[in-house]
Amino acid sequence: MIRSIVTRVLTVLFISAIITACQKEQKKQIDFPPTDLSKENLIPKPLKIIATNKTFGLDRHTAIYTNQKDEGFFEIGQFLADKIKAKIDLDVPVNEAGTNPIERIIYINRSDSLELNAPESYELYINPDSVIINSNTAEGAFRGIQTLRQIIPEQSNDTLAEQRIWPIPSGKIVDNPTFGFRGAMLDVARHFFSVDDVKKYIDLLAYYKINILHLHLTDDQGWRIEIKSWPKLTEIGGSTEVGGEAGGFYTQEDYKEIVAYASKHHMTIIPEVDMPGHTNAASVSYPFLNGNGKTPKLYEGTRVGFSTFDTRKDTVYAFIDDVVREISEITPGPYFHIGGDESHVTKKNDYIHFVEKVEKIVQKHGKKMIGWDEIASAEVDSSSISQYWSSGDNAQKAVKRGMKIILSPAKRAYLDMQYDTLSKHGLHWAAYIPVDSAYVWTPEEYEGIPMENILGVEAPLWSETISNMGELEYLAFPRVIGYSELSWTSKENRNWENYKLRLANQAPYLDRMDVKYYASPLIDWKKSKYSYKEIKKD
Ligand code: TNX
């Protein structure tokens, strides 16, 4: 307590010393019209916003300072400076004075005395002469930075050419997510997506505070991750994809690059190796794995449920042990996803035997097992996690086992479902999911699953019908933005009519990022943001 008071006092003294030193330099005083922080187009909507109707003027006399003792804070300051540069072409120095006299600062501070003390909570104070982001963790500070990025206007108030100012509304934001697990999944097996594609997806997801990216790395049509002890998996199994194109795979170095990029965005990568079904590509590479009695051949179609591993062979488990070990060694996150869905040609007893054996392997390599909802039919441990995609019965089995559940109900949260009958890409076996029905549901109360069993929400994007980034963006955006709000914002703060307006105002960001989103006619998309008019003082 005393330490935190001392830290606060020191912070205030530090900030006011810098500002007083700078104020002598201050040239023109500008009056801004009253602002309203509570009307900003923030997604996900923060827990609490208190507007104070003034303005922080971001300009070339602004510097970023960060807590220097704690790991990750300087990097976040640098991240913010890079994003400001990309958005408005302004250079903001980090932890140094830079070339211009400093009049205002943005301070990214580690604090252990927040109103809310959860791993990702943060407070954002915007005053006329300072912006202060307080968080107990680098992760929380990073989420706070995304909020700040969203309220930096695209356009400056530049009536005075030499004094361009980007006005930021003043006030206080106190924020914390409903769920610590806010995910998206990308199927890189049916069609392969490059490291750069994945990085762009990470950029976009992180802006909306999504903190999990689950990569569906293997399926019947392709094996997409290098396994050094079993090289044919990628040589043969990675050689094609749906439609017969060339396929592709990540080397372990590529995968590490994705993991590192995600971690810079405070995002966890979850690797999935789908088993015992969805394994045709593996069995073509190493036929001893195959358990469906046929000779496996490369597959470029979109049927599911025809392949299985031979679940009664020790060599199959020795193979799986190598795969789980090699991937776990380069995955810092706590999870390993074993798939487990649609094993229609695996006998029920064999399936149960398989899941129980693979769970032990995953645990041996230090990871928590995740599997699609079918895995709850096996005697799995309460520490394993079930991902609900289609079966309420399986979800109830998982609850009985005391497991946590990730909510990805296909009819609500599948990004590969078409918006409507006119959609250019996507499937509709579960539903058509227009932008409103993607948003208007309540994960906190989904089909009677107790809130304490819900780990979070994840939106999967299966890639049978998409083969490039533009097509990916068409299905993911704008719906994935709504899933970010469903998993971050409390249900009391969610409202479709209000969300719709904030979503409409994401257009300038999405356009700047060259995102080929689906411009749903339900949304009145705004092409440019309102810019403030400067009132000069006499
Ligand atoms: C079902 S969801 C699947 C996937 C398909 C998807 C298409 C799940 C666990 N399995 O194999 O790609 O539908 O929407």
Image (cartoon, helix red, strand yellow):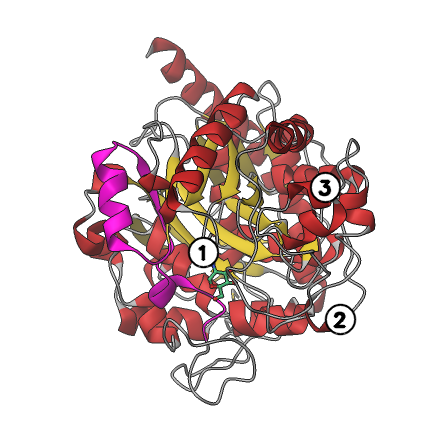
Circle 3 packing at 10 Å, graded few (<14), some (14-19), many (20+), is: many
Measure the C-alpha gap from mark 2 to mark 3.
Answer: 24 Å
Residue that numbered label 2 is attached to: 244
Residue 371 located left or right of residue 203: left
Residue 331: image location, x then y, percent? 63, 32
Circle 1 packing at 10 Å, graded few (<14), some (14-19), many (20+), is: some
- Tag 1–tag 2 contact (CB < 8 Å): no
Residue 402 located left or right of residue 314: left
Front of the two marks 1 and 2: 1
Q: Is tag 1's residue or tag 2's residue first in the polypeptide sequence? A: 2
Q: Amino acid at mark 1?
A: His
Residue 411: image location, x then y, percent? 34, 67
Front of the two marks 1 and 3: 1
Q: Amino acid at mark 3?
A: Tyr
Residue 412: image location, x then y, percent? 34, 65
Q: Residue at x 54, y 21 (%)?
A: 366
Q: Is tag 2's residue or tag 3's residue first in the polypeptide sequence? A: 2
Q: Amino acid at mark 2?
A: Gly
Q: Residue at x 53, y 79 (%)?
A: 518
Q: Residue 344: give its label.
A: 1
Magenta span of residues: 389-417
Q: Residue at x 79, y 33 (%)?
A: 228
Residue that numbered label 3 is attached to: 255
- Can I make out residue 163 in this image? no
Front of the two marks 2 and 3: 2
- Tag 1–tag 3 contact (CB < 8 Å): no
Q: Residue 482: give its label.
A: none
